[in-house]
Image: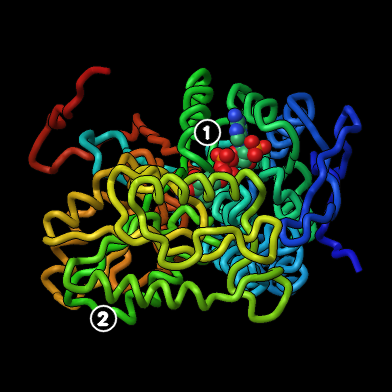
Amino acid sequence: MPSQWKRQQIHIAGQWLSADSGRTLDVINPATGERIGTVPDAGAAETRRAIEAASQAFDESRALTGNERAVLLRHLHDLLLDNREALAELLTSEQGKPLAEARGEIGMSAAYILWFAEEARRVYGDIIPSPWRDRRVLVTKQPVGVVGAITPWNFPSSMLARKLGPALAAGCTVVAKPAPQTPFSGLAWGALCEAAGFPSGVVNIVTGSATEIGGELTSNPLVRKITFTGSTAVGKKLIQQASGTVKKVSMELGGNAPFLVFDDADIDRAVAGAIEGKFRNAGQTCVCVNRFYAQAPVYDQFVEKLAAAAAALKLGDGREPDVQQGPLIDSNALAKVESFVADAVQNGGRVVTGGRRHALGGTFYSPTVIADANAAMKLAREEIFGPVAPVFKFQTEDEAIRLANDTEFGLAAYFHTNDLGRVFRVSERLDYGIVGVNEGLVTTEVAPFGGFKQSGTGREGSKYGIEDYLEIKYVCVGGLGVVAPANQSEPHEANSDGK
Ligand code: NAP
């Protein structure tokens, strides 16, 4: 039976609509290659109408009290959990990840929404001690306005949760564009927000041409903020486009995560962390390990155990029980992974396991471990975004840190050690926004998620996550009169720069 959350129309001002042109885009199940539905191929005109609807709804949204917003967000949270199975099945059908991971993602979406429901009630300002006797200095925070949100296919539900949660908690309104491979999980947010009771126009979802929708979102003056999760190349383009109307931008971009295994580490724990950190979502996460570095004395042992664990992973359609790795998202992703492995082999890499398409066919790729990795390989510099684990060798702590930091990216880094001093020395010197020490799964709604360098700007989740959706306003209240000290006839002259 089709899920009530599977919508094949775009959502503008509370209406479910087709594209103006009537054109549609096919949505494919990557595990089977079958067409599972269509979504409208909308463009700039529909996006403009969605922005106008969001702009009109902003007055109503900003007028809600923090408590009223919290109640709506709690409804949304409850709906997510009550419909977790249906939403997870929808997600797996278009994205391919194992159902257990999809259930986990819907749970994570709910956790972000609940966190921001709580934060909605805690948007505090300040009263700053005044330098003037007759004036008061107040600081308040208010929603930035209409937010344009663009998200990728690898976490089609939770990447939007991280944006909708803080935006709605702050009182903003939203126009979102999900990725074309996974639009149903994005459109489901429109239906969920409607069912939770958010007023029409507060959340609008548009599918279709990225350049047209992105072009309108980044140039329309009614949009005051762009929040994007995706590749660094597209992020740079959007920053440039948004500069024309000086919008606020939050960017969650690509990564090139290193994973260091020191010779004092618990190797079995490191291997378990490596499997989680590399092969989850078939290696298609921004915090996935891209480069493994093992210290010389434990190099062979780590490679051997990692290869054995990778080879034991069960591949298949994510809807089947016990499947641990699904297909890659599409044939482009498969071609990219194949070209990276070919390049690694050409540059002296030794395939210990995998290194080829999987017998299941389609876009399934075998979990792969490549030993003798070196800096000449493309996968040393670029994001692999697939189930391929290259292992480099290092000798000293200094060398490991230098190699780990030798990239323009700075999202997540991991290392394994049992030396307490090294835990602090290394974590402080890694130029990354997120560091996992003896731990491969670190994402949680309570901690700030985001990168250094070209991995982005801004943070999602945590107490910092709502700040990107708020403007700070300074209000100076003057003419209050001055109480003169009893023993002084003339009041003291206050500081003022005369501006
Ligand atoms: P992508 O190619 O950058 O696409 C992301 C989104 O941007 C899609 O909805 C895409 O739509 C849209 N887009 C592309 N070009 C656009 C343009 N000119 N204007 C407006 N929108 C445009 O990234 P992806 O391949 O889907 O996702 C993988 C990347 O996301 C990886 O680099 C990964 O590291 C990163 N990521 C980062 C985080 C994080 O939190 N830091 C989380 C998850 C993923 P179309 O497909 O229609 O072009």
Q: Is residue 1 left or right of residue 11?
A: right
Asked if ligand 1 lies within 8 A of label 1, the reply is yes
Q: Quadrant of residue 369?
A: bottom left
- Residue at 66% x, 49% y is 330
Q: Quadrant of residue 14?
A: top right
Label 2 crowd bin: few (<14), some (14–19), many (20+), radius 10 Å: some
Q: Is residue 381 left or right of residue 321?
A: left
- Residue at 67% x, 32% y is 210
Q: Is residue 455 above or below residue 387?
A: above
> Is the C terminus in the top left, top right, bottom left or bottom right quadrant?
top left
Does residue 46 appear in this view?
yes
Which mark lies nearer to you, 2 or 1? 2
Query: What number of labels is visible?
Result: 2
Residue 248 rendering spot, x and y as whole percentages: 47, 33
Identify the amino acid type marked 1. Val
For label 2, the residue is 266
Residue 90 rendering spot, x and y as whole percentages: 76, 63
Identify the amino acid type marked 2. Asp
| Quarter of image, ligand 1 | top right
- Residue at 63% x, 30% y is 214
Q: Is residue 107 above or below residue 408?
A: below
- Residue at 66% x, 66% y is 359
Which circle's residue, 2 or 1, is located before the other in the chain? 1
Viewer-closest of 148 and 480: 148
Secondary element type, mark 2: loop
Give the Cα separation between the discs numbered 2 and 1: 39 Å
Q: Residue placed farthest to the left in the image?
A: 487
Residue 306 rendering spot, x and y as whole percentages: 39, 73
Specify the label residue 234 is tagged with: 1
